[in-house]
Image (cartoon, helix red, strand yellow):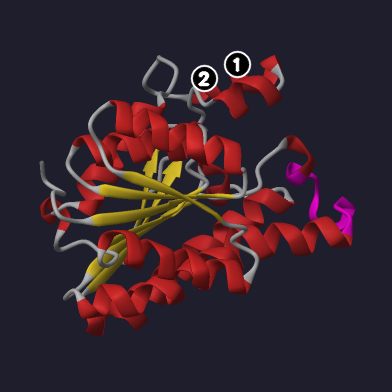
Amino acid sequence: MRFAGKCAVITGAGAGIGRVYAQALAREGAAIAIADIDAGAGEDAVAEIASQGGRAVSIVTDVADDAQVERMAAEAVRAFGGIDILVNNAGLHLMEYAAPCTQLERAKWRRLLDVNVTGALMCAAACRPSMKERGGGVIINQSSMAAYSPTGAYAVSKLALNGLTMALAAEFAPDNIRVNGIAPGLVDSEAAMRTLPDQIKEQVWASQLIKRPGRMTDLAAMLLFLCSDDSSFITGQTLIVDGGTTRRP
């Protein structure tokens, strides 16, 4: 129970990877604020955690809306007394956002950056005061292996998020807040399995050094490490969890 007495705010936690993150932290004792734009999905995630003996609340949140983000932080503090962990998991990622940058409609481009980059910034800023008051905290930004070979709009947004992780790590360090990122490869999330063409899935799996499909639980294991004191000397980093597809010196 490494996170007993702590509160974690997780955006986009109504389904997929965010929901697995919420379950993993709840099993380790954290109280969870499910911040999702889909009210029904958020309530389902809360019910699932409660059925396993955990504590959770659902807060309907569009991370691109300043007022909703401020309300998200305030409601998490009201429900659980403060915020210790923020996971910026909400993001736009369907195939339409993988289009070449100049071919993506301008409105979609702005929405992509509002959610994937500016949304993470606003959530971090909103949660910072409570983390500071509690003596520090941890922020995790959900990146992607696509950031390391950016050929489309989605990948560019994740590369920008990696830069934000570095900048916030330096800015928040005086408050004892560590900021890191996780860059997943292809894992068994419902959205990835449903929307990615089979050809792309096969190409990704063939490029991996570890010859098995990635799992959302692989990412949850990294999340728990980065949120715990086991990683107390790590900040400003984005760790790649992709089976060895991305290899850097």
Q: Is residue 26 visible?
A: yes
Tell whether position 99 is magenta.
Answer: yes
Count of marks placed on residues: 2
Left or right of 14, for residue 167 = left
Callouts 2 and 1 close, C-beta under 8 Å: yes
Residue drawn at x 44%, y 74% is 126
Tell whether position 157 is magenta.
Answer: no
Q: Quadrant of residue 158?
A: bottom right
Where is residue 116? Give x, y as percent.
60, 58
- Looking at the picture, tell me which residue is in the foreground, 124 or 199: 124
Judge the density around disc 1: few (<14), some (14-19), many (≥20) Cα neighbours within 10 Å.
Answer: few
Residue type, mark 1 in image: Glu
- What is the C-alpha distance between the residues marked 2 and 1? 5 Å
- Looking at the picture, tell me which residue is in the foreground, 183 or 193: 193
Residue designated by label 2: 205
Residue drawn at x 60%, y 27% is 192
Where is residue 104? Give x, y as percent.
85, 52
Residue type, mark 2 in image: Trp
Q: Secondary structure at mark 1?
A: helix
Left or right of 107, for residue 25 = left
* Chain part drawn in magenta: 97-105
Residue 98 position (above or below residue 137): above
Q: Secondary structure at mark 2?
A: helix
Q: Is residue 249 visible?
A: no
Residue designated by label 1: 202
- Looking at the picture, tell me which residue is in the foreground, 114 or 164: 114
